[in-house]
Image (cartoon, grey):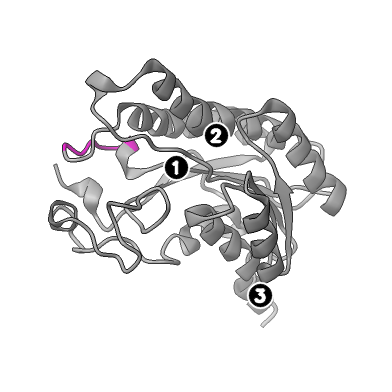
């Protein structure tokens, strides 16, 4: 049928910046963008990893940068526009986690997490939205990768700075959606549960092995598997969610349903 190509490639010709793309969920979501027909602009600090991923994905451009640095954020957006002539989406997936008791968490560590997990996504969203408003047609979607820990706290995993930053990111998502909707820019969030990644190394092994307390508090009795965030991200970036903004899609195996 005439609609079949759109269904098979919901992000056909969309240009999407994905931060934190050198590893973990960022790399996974970049691959999802390409798999859905889009062009991924890969952003991270580790050049060799970015280049290897770009080569593997094909429709991808690697831009080595630190999204915590203003000049790098500007260069990232301009590189995407110079290379592709447009910008349809942004996935703010870069983040940092520093677990530890709040009583011993330094203000320096607390600020670092807020800076990368909340301030940088806001600043990059500002730049992206400004350029999205200037173009005709295409998509205009920003997806913030938050965390189930922005919705609830886990006694076994104390992380004051991380939790504050991710809860703030959820509030920021709602507020930007409210302000930018009139420009046709949609802003939504994904709140992942626990997946094997660099950030969860030491807690979850590569095969999905996890502590009993985590599995026991998750209704589906396991952690996330590779690819289980893909559909949610592609949906939020695509026309399939055209009347959806300011929302958080929780992909956590039901962890957030438990008190």
Query: Which of disc 3 and disc 2 is earlier in sequence?
Result: 3
Instruction: Identify the residue at image location x=62%, y=31%.
Output: 180
- 25 relative position to 208: left or right: right
Q: Nearer the viewer, mark 2 or mark 3?
A: 2
Measuring from the top left, give residue 170's x and y in whole percent.
42, 34
Q: Name the residue rendered at 31%, 61% in the picture.
A: 205
Please give the range of residues in magenta: 150-155
Task: Tell me residue 99's x, y (percent).
Answer: 31, 35
Magenta highlight: main SS:
loop
What residue would you read off at disc 2?
177
Quadrant position of the N terminus in the picture: bottom right
Of residues 158 and 35, the one nearer the viewer is: 158
- Residue 39 appears in view: no
Is 190 on the left-hand or right-hand side of 214? right
Q: CA distance from mark 2 to mark 1?
A: 9 Å
- Give the position of the C terminus as an image quadrant: top left
Q: Identify the element where label 1 is drawn.
A: loop
Q: State how far apart marks 2 and 3 are (Cα).
A: 28 Å
> From the viewer's perspective, is the residue at label 1 or at label 3 nearer?
1
Residue 125, by quadrant, is top right
Q: Which image quadrant is residue 167 in?
A: top left
247 versus 139 height, above or below: above
How many other residues sit within 10 Å of disc 3, few (<14), some (14-19) or many (≥20)? few
- Tag 2 and tag 1, C-beta contact below 8 Å: yes
Q: Is residue 152 magenta?
A: yes
Position in image of residue 14 (x %, y %): 72, 58
Q: Which residue is mark 1?
A: 247
Which of marks 1 and 2 precedes in the sequence? 2
Image-based side of 8 in relation to 75, left or right? left
């Amino acid at each position: 049928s005439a609609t079949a190509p759109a269904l098979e490639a919901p992000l056909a010709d969309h240009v999407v910046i994905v931060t934190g793309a050198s590893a973990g969920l960022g790399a996974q979501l970049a691959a999802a963008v390409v798999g859905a027909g889009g062009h991924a602009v890969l952003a991270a600090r580790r050049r060799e990893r970015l280049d290897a991923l770009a080569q593997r994905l094909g429709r991808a451009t690697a831009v080595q940068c630190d999204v915590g640095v203003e000049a790098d954020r500007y260069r990232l957006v301009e590189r995407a526009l110079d290379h592709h002539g447009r910008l349809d989406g942004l996935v703010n997936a870069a983040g940092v986690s520093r677990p530890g008791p709040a009583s011993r968490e330094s203000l320096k560590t607390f600020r670092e997490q807020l800076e990368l997990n909340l301030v940088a996504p806001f600043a990059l969203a500002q730049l992206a939205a400004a350029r999205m408003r200037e173009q005709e047609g295409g998509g205009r979607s920003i997806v913030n990768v938050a965390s189930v820990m922005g919705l609830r706290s886990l006694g076994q995993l104390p992380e004051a700075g991380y939790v504050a930053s991710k809860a703030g990111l959820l509030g920021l998502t709602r507020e930007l959606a409210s302000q930018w909707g009139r420009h046709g820019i949609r802003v939504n969030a994904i709140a992942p549960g626990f997946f094997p990644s660099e950030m969860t190394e030491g807690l979850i092994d590569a095969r999905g092995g996890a502590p009993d307390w985590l599995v026991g508090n998750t209704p589906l009795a396991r952690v996330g598997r590779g690819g289980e965030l893909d559909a949610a991200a592609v949906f939020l970036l695509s026309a399939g969610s055209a009347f959806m903004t300011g929302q958080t899609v929780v992909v956590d195996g039901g962890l957030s349903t438990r008190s």
